[in-house]
Amino acid sequence: MADTPEEIQKAKKTYLLVFGLLLLGTVITVAVATYPPFDVGHHGFDRYDCILGLFIATVKASLVAAIFMHLNHEKKTVYWLISSAVAAVISLGGLTALAMRDPIFDKFFY
């Protein structure tokens, strides 16, 4: 934690910078979702816009976790926990994608 006035001012600048980045990320997300010039993929909100929006949200969540929750100063155990959670989410997403590619057609699954 900050003990001197100089450290407090430095932390304050960091928090304001992160706030600005979060605000910019929100503006970009809204622009991608609503304004046609920023539309990626096909016309209207589609999966490419969703993927871009989720990427921006992931960056914003990482900033909040690292700076505001002070996870950038934590020990290796926290990083192992976070990386294992990310690996679990990726694995479950992959299993969901596989299940969507090869659905089960059985009378018990309807």
Image (tube, rainbow, N blue to C red):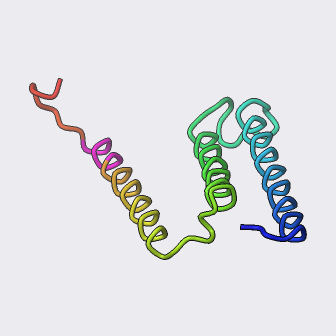
Give the percent coordinates (x, y) of residue 47: 56, 39
Q: Is residue 9 left or right of residue 49?
A: right
Horizontal side of residue 56 vs 74, given as left or right: right
Above or below, 14 against 29 in this view is: below
41 or 20, which is in the foreground? 20
Q: Pinpoint residue 67: horizontal percent, then vertical percent.
A: 69, 60
Residue furthest out toward the bottom: 76
Determine the image quadrant of residue 91.
bottom left
> Going by the image, does 76 lie left or right of 54?
left
Q: Quadrant of residue 84?
A: bottom left
User: Which residue is at 48% across, 76% downward?
Assistant: 76
Which residue appears at 47% of the width and 67% of the height?
78
User: The N terminus is located in which quarter?
Assistant: bottom right
Q: Residue at x 33, y 46 (%)?
A: 96
Name the image quarter holding the C terminus: top left
Give the farthest residue toward the front. Answer: 3
**In the figure, 2 relative to 54: above or below?**
below
| Depth order, front residue of 77/110 | 77
The magenta-colored residue range is 96-102
Query: Relative to residue 46, is residue 73 depicted above or below?
Result: below
Q: Quadrant of residue 53?
A: top right
Predominant secondary structure, magenta span: helix
Residue 30 is situated, as x and y percent measured from the top left of the image, at: 75, 35
Q: Does the magenta run of residues contain 86?
A: no
Front residue (pair 99, 102): 99
Horizontally, residue 79 falls left or right of residue 19, namely left
Residue at 72 percent of width and 40 percent of height:
29
